[in-house]
Every structure is written in C-alpha cells, then in structure tokens.
Image: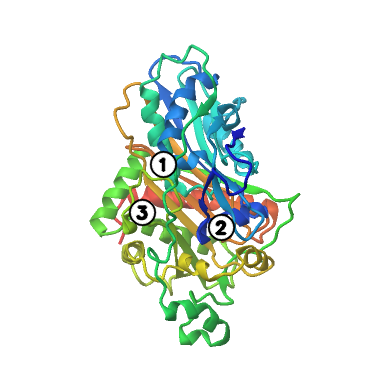
Amino acid sequence: MCFARSSSPRGDNYLRAASSGECRCIVRESVGFYRALVVGSIYEFSTPTDLTSIYTFAPALRKCIDRHPLLSASIAGSDTKSPFYQFCPRLDLNQHVQFFRQGVESETQAIQLLLPSILDTKWPPSIPPWRIIILPLSETRCFIGFCFSHALGDGMSAIAFHRTFLDALQDNVGQQSGKQNLVHSQGFRPLSPPFDTKANLPISWTFLLSPLLGLYLPASFGFGLNTITPTTWTGSTTFYHPEKYQVGVEICSIDATTVRKVLKECRAQGSKITGLIHQLIVSALSELLPEGYDNFAAQTAINMRNAVGVSNEEMGLYVAGDVEILNRASPQTMTTPLWARAKSMTDKLAAAASRTQDQSVGLLRYLSDIRAWTLSKLHQRRGGSYEVSNLGNFQPAGNCEHVSVTDLVFAQSTDVNGPALNFNVVSASDGPMTVTITWQIGALDLGVQSESEFVKAVCQKLEDSLTRISDMDVP
C-alpha cells in the first residue's frame, strides 16, 4: 500500500507531469495494449540461505528504493489526457515481492513457464508499478526478476536495479534472520526531468511534416518515416480482445564460449552483435516465412543516455527507436556479404544513438491526444516486422564475493500496436547470452499452433547460425 501525505491529486505528493513518451507508455497500459517487462537472473549465494523469506531480500530492496526515486512513484490520471507521477512516502514491501514455487521442470523450463504470467501483470493504480519475482531453485540458487511498468523506465532501468540489488545483497548475507518492519518510509524526493523534451530532442520542420506529407505524396518523394510496402512482412493487422490477450514466449540461450567467439569475430569485422543479430533474424525469417514478402521493417530500441549525458545507473525512459528496411534473404538479394551488412547496420545504429535531432519519439509532443492516437492504430497495419532490444552485457557494480548472478533473461509483453515479433537480448558477465522472443498470440498470422512451431524454428536457426559463426570464418 502507498500511504499518501495529501488527498489532493496534485497536492504535496505531486512529482511532475508525464512526458509525451511516458504518456504513451501509460496510455497503452491503461487500455491493456501492453502490460509489463521483466529482467531476471539466477542469483547464486555462497552459503545456504533462506530464499523463501521476504526478510532475506528486504534490506537490499530498501537500498534500491532509496537509490532510485522512480521506485517510489505511482501513476495518477492514467485514464486522462494529462497523467502524472506522485510520490509514495511509505511502501509496503509485501506488495512488491512475489514468490513462486518450482515444479518438476528444469530451471530453464520453470522460468519460461513463469514468464507469460509475469508479462500479463496489470498494475494497481494506488502503488508504484513494480515488483520483484522470486523463484527459489535450491538453498543457494534462485531466480529473481524485476518486473515493472514501462512508464517507470526502459530495459536498462532493470539493469540498474539489478546492479544496485546485487551490490546491496553482498552486505546482508547471513544477517537476515530477524524479522523487520516491511513498511519502508522515506522523505520526499523529486524525479529527474523527462528525457523526451524539446531541449533534448529538437524536431526540424521537415521531419515534423514528414508523417503528414507521407500520407498524401508518393513514397518516391521520401517523406515517409520508413518505406514499408505491400510486400513487407508485418504479421496480422493489430487486434485486441481483453479476455483473449496472451503473450507467447520462447527462450534460446547461447553458451558463453560461443558468445566470446562471436564477439571476437564481430570486433574483427567492425560490427556489433546487434547488427549481426539483425542479419541472422532476417535470414531465419526469410527461410521460414511463405513466399510473397520481399522485405522486413526492422526496429531497434536505442539507449539514449549517453547522447543526453545521463548515466546508465539512472532509471527512467531514455529510449528511442530506429527503423531500417532489410531485404528478404535470397541468393539474388544477398549479394553483399554477411559481415558487410552487419557492419552497415551497426554504423546506422551508432549514428542514431548519437543523434538527438529528429528522433521519432520526439514527434509524440505534437499529438494533442495520445490516448485517441493509440486507440486509432487498432485494426491497422503494423509499423514493423520485428524489434530487437539488446541490453548488452551485465556488469556487477562491485565485488561478488557472497552473491553472484548468471544466466540473465529479458522479456516484455508485446505492444498490441507494435511489431509482430520482439527479440529481447541480454548477456551475463563472461556468461551466456539469452534471446527471448515474445509475440502476441495470433499476431504472426500463421495459426496459433503454427506460430509456436515457427518461433521455435526461428530460435533454433539463431542458435545454429551463431554456433557456425563461432566455429568458422564467415565471408
């Protein structure tokens, strides 16, 4: 429960108005088009620990709340045109910790079975929209997932949380036996300013008018934000039935040795692994999809913290997006070698990450009613084929003598109005890389049973391609 200091909706607990980008996230969750995202990891303790007790984790959780002000922020006015954040002086930790029990399945299977229910989380309006999910696996191992509303932050926000949480656990191992007051109190703390301001993301007149002109002028004039054509694969048109909304989840894990070899080859070729992953996804989709599609609208989530001088330790919504049209792979279209294509994609993403002017997310400021705009996109063609969101390599904040993390996983519920597939990528420090594919059941337009088989096949082809790259030279 969140205990407020004032009954006025904009009284003493008022923090600030939601920005346009934050408002977009708030609105789509309010109407049910998006639910939650989660970044989790296997936590390994050096000694047997009671991993079924909230008191084991409460001290570290308190430090996270003290370190990250957004964890004390709830969202008000989500059903209005002007939602805002308000401060919660006291948080009942019982409402932010949820335990699960492992069945007879393996650890990986248990986590994959758990993810759909996590991603279907609907947040109560009265408390900050986040919780940690704890799945004990033994006396020294448990899965801990940080699940939260996208209105509180992006995927890198979860990395910041885990770095703080892991560091705090080092000081508390063996000291959690006594019961504690689980209501955490704190003084008022303001939030950092939003990312997507006019100062941070200026918009030129040409870019501002492009979406409008693109509706009325031929594509050859170049005024569209991308060049999706009738033969671009985008899955089904967007749809939403609240009682039938489901998220499909498939996890593929690439072992640490393979990851090291692939990263070494990427560096030698002047590419980043995200650029390579895009090419491998296109190759897999091209092989598995039926004929009739010529290209893919490939979206990438971009961390903009560096571009605006913000630390990666800062929680918040600092994400922009890039869209590239990639040709379907065939002997005729793939005349450019794999590494040249991966490097080209890498260079484009690097340029987008360093550019603050004319970012598409900045256009949201010019919408008078984001809720109406969100609802208007229903039953329309999707704006993308798939999206890649890569959180990179998790690095602990300090020494991991008592507790360490391995085998991270990153997943998010699908945006009803978003691309057909989401590829969520994260790596452990010197450990494996996990790619979690999520999709709205029915969005691939392949039949429900065929969808699951299709995504499993995509996963397998990604694994096989990365293994081949680690084992041999690729032209």
Residue 41, x across and y down, in percent: 46, 34
Which residue is nearer to you in this view: 393 or 183? 183
Mark toward the viewer: 2 or 1: 2
Mark 3, Cα crowd under 10 Å, few <14 / some 14-19 / many 20+, is: many
Q: Is residue 159 left or right of residue 244?
A: left
Identify the residue at image location x=55%, y=23%.
Answer: 182
Disc 2 target residue? 23
Residue 243 pos. (x, y %) = 76, 49
- Looking at the image, which is closer to me, 445 or 186? 186
| Residue at image location 56% in from the left, 52% down from the top | 84
The kind of secondary structure element at disc 2 is helix
**Nearer mark to the viewer, of 1 and 3:** 3
What amino acid is found at the position of numbered circle 2 in the picture? Cys
Dot 2 or dot 1: first in sequence order is 2
Q: Which mark is residue 305?
A: 3
Asked whether disc 1 touches disc 3, contact meaning CB atoms under 8 Å apart, the reply is no
Q: Write the residue at 39% across / 34% down.
A: 164
Task: Find the distance from the CA under tag 1 to the CA under tag 3.
Answer: 13 Å
| N-terminal label among 2 and 3 | 2
Where residue 422 sits in the image (x, y, percent)?
53, 54
Image check: 5 left or right of 442? Answer: left
Q: Secondary structure at mark 3?
A: loop
Question: Which residue matches tag 1?
Answer: 159
